[in-house]
Image (spheres, coloured by chain):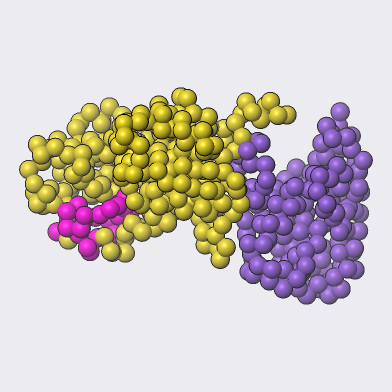
Amino acid sequence: MTHILLDAAGFQERLNWLAHQIAQRNVNGADVLIVGIQLGGVHLAQRLASKLSALWNRSVPYGVLDVSMHRDDLGNRATPLMRPTEIPGDLTGKTILLTDDVIFSGRTTRAALDALNDFGRPKCIQLAVMVDRGHRELPITPDFVGLPVETRVDQRVEVLFVEEAGRDEIQLV
Amino acid sequence: MPHSWTRQHLLDLQSLSADELVVLLDTARHFKQVGERSIKKVPALRGKTIVNLFVEPSTRTRISFELAGLRLSADIINFSAESSSFKKGESLKDTALNLEALNADFIVIRHGASGAPHFLSRFLKAHVVNAGDGAHEHPTQGLLDAFTIREKKGRIEGLNVTILGDILYSRVARSNIWALQKLGANVTLCGPPSLVPKIFEEIGCRVVWNMEEALRDADVINLLRIQHERQRATMFPSIGEYAGLFGLNQSRRHLVKPDALIMHPGPINRGVEIDNTFADGAQSVILQQVTNGLAIRMAVLFLLGGGRREEIAAAV
């Protein structure tokens, strides 16, 4: 059974709230680079980049990161097909805002932290997610959460973005 | 397009679908980028063991697989025929079982007998990768050639690819033919009739025996080495005559399209199948093939390293 957690209006409101939280913590955002984790984090990275560009009145760069090569569970599942990794420039000294649609076990985030290491040594890394659905298996906590949701392990959270699904929506399946 | 890779072994290209070939080529593109970073290593196969079982000598393919494994953080050991128990009479099966008993996760095999990798795949739990078996196939070479063509030309479909030289004994030619045909290229084979029999027409290739026809419309010219080690003296009179009739040299420059790619799997015999002006010229992508080979082999090891379908089903 599909339960809609957020409709388009609610989605927009949480996204704005997320952007404001990020802007408050990183006052002028001069050294911020957004990196979206493939696949779900990419749309969030784009949306936050445009909202933060407006808040900071400057263009905020963003990149995308595929973490398949850095996962610790390659042998436990069929090899996923890879998506592009495009990181603009060296990350050394930058503040990285890592984005993903949903945080669950935390293993994707861990893989992303490892992958980012290969591109330099950032000054700090912050994590923004649209949904935190709990059940962490690693000591990883996001800095910014759009929507915390109580879930059972066997449920699934789907974050739909207008760019791909035609509407913004968050579902619990 | 499939969403994941499910094969356990890479034994040949003949049995792969066009979609699977595209997955391999796309994955290799991502690994090529890794090779261009300052940190060229990823942890994907950390803790895995790869055995290079090279029963037939090879330097470049072995080194390429070795470096591919290292860049994926695997442990690699090399097992070569000269220094091994084959000399003491151990069978291939026993050798492979011994290597598996050491918990090898991948066995990369080069063997003089066609079908040796298929044979191993029947009883090994480890992933088997064919690094060249007799005159049968050399799948990673076929893939890296396809990758290089796609990278340089932007596509494979509709291109005219001429493979020139010793086709009969060439596993490189066979793997190229399967990959290129599945991806929509028109393949022409050319060389002396004794090494390029008409029978290849049965698998959809054009067979021609003169260079003018072979070169005129070619978008890609892939030159193969004359394999002295597999050759019998009766196949053609002399190297000199071969160079005169089928060598790619200045006298044939006017037959070659100015944007045709010149490829060669190496090692090249300068002055025989190719002269310096072509080997070192602007159209040559011979060294880029070597770079791309590394990316292809990383992609192959990575994709095979995923879980098997039945194991995954059991774990869920």
Residue B268 appears in view: yes
How many tags in the picture? Answer: 0
| Residue B277 on the magenta segment | yes
Locate residue B260, reporting x and y percent. Answer: 31, 55
| Residue B299 on the magenta segment | no
Locate residue A14, reporting x and y percent. Answer: 90, 53
Task: Choose top left, top right, bottom left or bottom right for residue B310.
Answer: top right
Residue at position x 67%, y 47% from top? Answer: A71
Q: Nearer the viewer, residue A76 or A84?
A: A76
**Most extreme residue toward the front, as rendered?**
B88
Q: In the image, B119: left or right of A110?
A: left
Residue at position x 88%, y 34% from top? Answer: A152
Task: Choose top left, top right, bottom left or bottom right for residue B314.
Answer: top right
Residue B176 appears in view: no
Q: Nearer the viewer, residue B38 or B127?
A: B127
- Quadrant where the image shows the N terminus of chain A: top right
- Quadrant where the image shows the C terminus of chain A: top right
Q: Nearer the viewer, residue B212 or B290?
A: B290
- Dominant secondary-structure state across the stretch colored magenta: loop
Q: Please identify which colour was used for chain A in the image.
A: purple
Locate residue A118, reporting x and y percent. Answer: 63, 62
Q: Nearer the viewer, residue B104 or B287?
A: B104
Residue at position x 82%, y 53% from top? Answer: A140
Q: Which residues are magenta?
A: B251-278
Q: In the picture shown, does residue A35 fall above or below B310?
A: below
Locate residue B159, reporting x and y percent. Answer: 36, 45
Residue at position x 85%, y 54% from top? Answer: A141
In the figure, the yellow chain has which letter?
B
Q: In the picture shown, does residue A97 fall above or below B239?
A: below
